Amino acid sequence: MARIFEYFVVCGLGPEIRTLDGTKGYHGTEYLYLPSLLDQYPPLNHTLYPPPPPQLPTCVLPAGVELFPSGFDSNDPLSYPRSYPIVLTEGDGSKIYVSCITFRDPVCEDIAEAYCIPPNSFADKCICVVSRSPCFRVLREALEEIFALCFSPSGSSKPLWDVIAHIVSNVPLPTPGKERVLFAIDNCLLSVEVPPKDGLPHADISFQPLVQCLDVDNLIKLFTAVLLERRILIRSNKYSLLSLASEAICHLIYPFRWQHVYIPLLFFSGVDYIDAPTPYMMGLHSGVDTSNLGMDGVVIVDLEFNQITTTEEIPPIPEPELSLLRGEILKLLHPNVVGIDLMRANFCGSSDQNLKIINKPWGEDHDLQLRLIFLKFFASILAGYRNFMENNATHVFNTQAFLKKRSRSTNQPSEPMIAQFLDSHGFLDYLESGLGSDENNDNLLDKLQDALGRGQNPLSILPSILAEPEIVTISDPDVGVSGSGAKYTYDRFPSNVRTEEQEEKRKQILAAVNGAIEYSGRQTPSSPSISSLERAAERERMVLDIKVKLQGLWLRLLKLEAGEDPLSSFEYGTILALIESDAEGIGGSGFVECIREHINSGWHGQLTEEQFIAVKELLKTAISRATSRNDVLTIRDALEVSAEMYKKDANNVPDYVQRHLISLSIWEELRFWEGYFDYLVEQSSDKSANYAALVTAQLIVLASHMVACLAGLGLPDNDAWYIIETIAERNNIGYKLLIKLRGLLSHIHQLRINYWGVSSGKPQSLLPPGLSSPRLKDAADENQEPLEASGVGRSWVQSMFSRDTSSRTNSFSRVRKWASDGAAENGNARKQDMSSAGQKKTQTNVRILRGHSGPVTALHCVTRREVWDLVGDREDAGFFISGSTDCTVKIWDPSLRGSELRATLQGHTRTIRAISSDRGKVVSGSDDLSVIVWDKQTTQLLEELKGHDAQVSCVRMLSGERVLTAAHDGTVKMWDVRTDTCVATVGRCSSAVLCMEYDDTSGILAAAGRDAVANIWDIRAGRQMHKLLGHTKWIRSIRMVGDTLITGSDDWTARVWTVSRGTCDAVLACHAGPLLCVEYSASDKGIITGSTDGLLRFWENDEEGIKCVKNVTIHTAPILSINAGEQWLGVGAADNSMSLFQRPQERLGVPNIGSKMSGWQLYRTPQKTNAVVRCVVSDLERKRICSGGRNGVLRLWEATINI
């Protein structure tokens, strides 16, 4: 049977003292110190119960431990004990409820002596009970009785820890609605009861503090912010208010649940969490200073002064629901004022439930009425929602149809508050959980809607109590049996009995501290062994904390539906942030360990294609971070986990993760493979085998990771053999075994060719056409001329028996050694490679442009073609225009160094998604459903175009004062700026439009998006020409030049179409991830594609069809932008890396022989900085590339070319 009390825990000043900033030792009473877990029951060595959360001491004493010269003083209110609840959230979303009492307790004598703390000093101590059930009342009552029993002058009849052990071990959690449990603490009788499960969720709290601190309008405003999943920070100078207010508002949004970060009482040192970009609900003591934090977009709720402030507008609840909700709350809170004109007699049989509790003090009836008021609000605002539920692969609710139906019924336009709520995680989670249940028998919202429709009392939906609950009495058989009449009294809270191991550890720590202080003149303040031990303990606590979060996020990532995009999910973003922000690698190693534990627990490794891409990118990030720290253990574990995932699901996974890790540089480092080999030998279970056989067996394991046909990296052949041969020779492997090993690797190499096709290291004539190998792996070195262009390169299989060592030397030059023993060879080879590629290493210019306060979400470059007139080039050619989540549009002039920001355009109320311009105007589209046209010179707002029913995704300025827009409502509209009207809806798609192209000369429009269909319209003729079918997933990129249309999709393919005929001419399928951008090179009649796999592929069309003639791997993150000109090609990726390509043969007058597209050569790339980029644009006329980061910063790279 489940227990109501899981743990009794004591936290306070432990034997290892350090300040909140981590400084060891005692530094006076003016400092605050980190709390430690001092005692617990059940004890830590109890095998049946998991340990309490590692963050518990920090959370129950959020301000830290303060030391005082005196204890409790009846004349000093600050010395009174404090009682308050807290709520902890684990990684899987489950809650832990804790009741705490903090008081001043004497510092232990041995600690005071070791740290030279003044005698008779007191320190904060916290006792708490931990439970999985939200029974706040009984938790508090039980804890207060234990505290009173400890310090009672009459004492207790048995030792205090025996009393604690009895209630923790023996008091069960009652069966909901059927049992009432009675138990006693000494002479005090307590009871606990849980309501039936089919009613409202159990809320053992009073809602009165929330409605007393906030007036009705602010209560509704906070309620709306929670529904719309904003970042919410609750402030108060009382811990209890923070927890109770947070829990109360979470109950008021029932039947929906808060899906994001939830920390009702944030510890003071975690104040930086407020800068998190994702939704959260946190409570912070009002005494903590937040003036140095960026609070943009945060909804700050001040419970002390009844104030709510935010920089982002919270859309109001629409009418008539707002008035009804406000009136019902006022009637409950102030019945005498609301009903002052009503007759007191029960005239006409009035049965208003509120009139029955007019003069009653606030109690459970008021709590129930308040919860029903908000439930009735949901029943009204979501009336008929069940008719719009859909159970298909793409979505579960037809939001647009529901909004249109509501607009017709209320005669009101579309309401932003409802639209945003229907897109929230809480609403989607509610729908998905409802689809999986049996006719929603326990759904009180549906029951209430049905009851209101039949005119029944809302209370009728709640279960009726037909019988009194069964009484279960828990007695302590040891009470009153001893007969000795002994009483146990205490002058401090007693310590539990420690084990010999715990006592010895405590003595060692204090002895080391005492010795360090005594001999501080001759040695450092702390011994190295103790310092190492402390660091290990601290790291272990951090690992546990992050690991719990990662486990929950990982499981939720795997539960995403097929139609959801994991790369844009909250789970993926949070895991990525944990990996990227953790300097000690706990996030990366924890994520790898999380996957391994999941595999060991029986997971079959099955992933959807979208999840596969997300896991691949997370592992690549974890390995990259580990490489920068020389964390070989994490790199090794990630390599093995990637292989284990394939072995678990060889038949279902269409690809394997490990093959995508080849773009990382760590695999070229000989020292890594040597360390991995030593680890394999050390871990080998067959230590008694012949040494040569043991070494050979582990080298085969190494080779399987390097070049295996299915579950390997696909390392370049020369590099792989050189590494294997070097390790074999250093371990004195004989000639015969070396020959066998070479033969085995030769066989593996042939298998890889048969499965994946000819590698990019083969001559150009062997390259397959676009469809022959859907997942061809490219291993070209970006610092040398590609082998497919030069037509050279022998397989190591052909040369491994040759006595000529030149091939081995060349291979070795491409293997970057960890140490400096290969620096000379590596450097010379790189210089030769760069010389052969015609590259020039000149100084580049990178500028940082700051101005946005939120992530940059849209970028546009003003080209010469846009602003050309009869006079010639205008001065604004080359400007960059950016949009952000801060709702502003900014114009940048790169020619003004140091003052690039030329103008800031304000008018939108939500995130900017698209920007375009012409000679005199700038147009922008936003999530606020509007399109705004600005005057580029005066920066005045000219027109606001409203007509879309969802966020605007594309905008395009056309000639003749016209604007073309597309949105997530599936429509493409044309507007006349002069009249501020929508001329026509020129196109309709069945789902959201993500990309659009328009040819102003022919009037041909192409648009595509989430319905995986490319639609072609002839606007001038007013007809749809074609629906191009073929893609199976979202189309994210589109490019139209003349009669040729290219589309890139999430199905990992690009397609080439003929517009006039509406036919598909080719399918380009060599990428290993969604295609985010496609480009057409008009001078070559070739195609360039970029994908989330980080690869840039060049395609050429000849008599034999379209084939890939060149692959570039200099980018390791998704390619976001490709812009091709006549001589130059600009590329930008999500990891803030950029590259500029050119055709040196044509520029120097050398005739182009062979492939035209392979003539593109890397000219220059700037040094990459650590940033996450959302958008990139290129200005090829001035050799500039600009990226917009998630941190709101623009990075402008200007490649000054002197030839």
Image: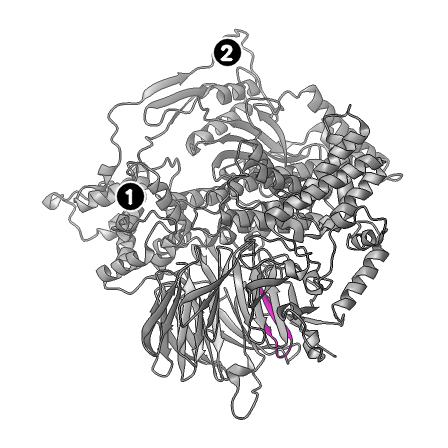
Q: Is residue 1189 magenta?
A: yes
255 or 1174: nearer the eye?
A: 1174
- The image shows residue 540 at horizontal and vertical percentages of 66, 36
Secondary structure beneath label 2: loop
Chain part drawn in magenta: 1176-1194
Residue marked by disc 1 = 445
Q: State the residue position of label 2.
A: 478
Question: Which kind of residue does numbered mark 1 sit on?
Answer: Leu
**Which of 789/86 is in front?**
789
Q: Quadrant of the N terminus?
A: top left
Is the magenta region chiefly helix, strand or loop? strand
Q: Nearer the viewer, residue 1177 or 507?
A: 1177
Relative to 1187, 814 lies left or right: right
- The amino acid on which the numbered mark 2 sits, given as a three-letter code, is Asp
Front in this rendered view, residue 647 or 472 = 647
Question: Which residue is at 24% across, 52% downward?
Answer: 338
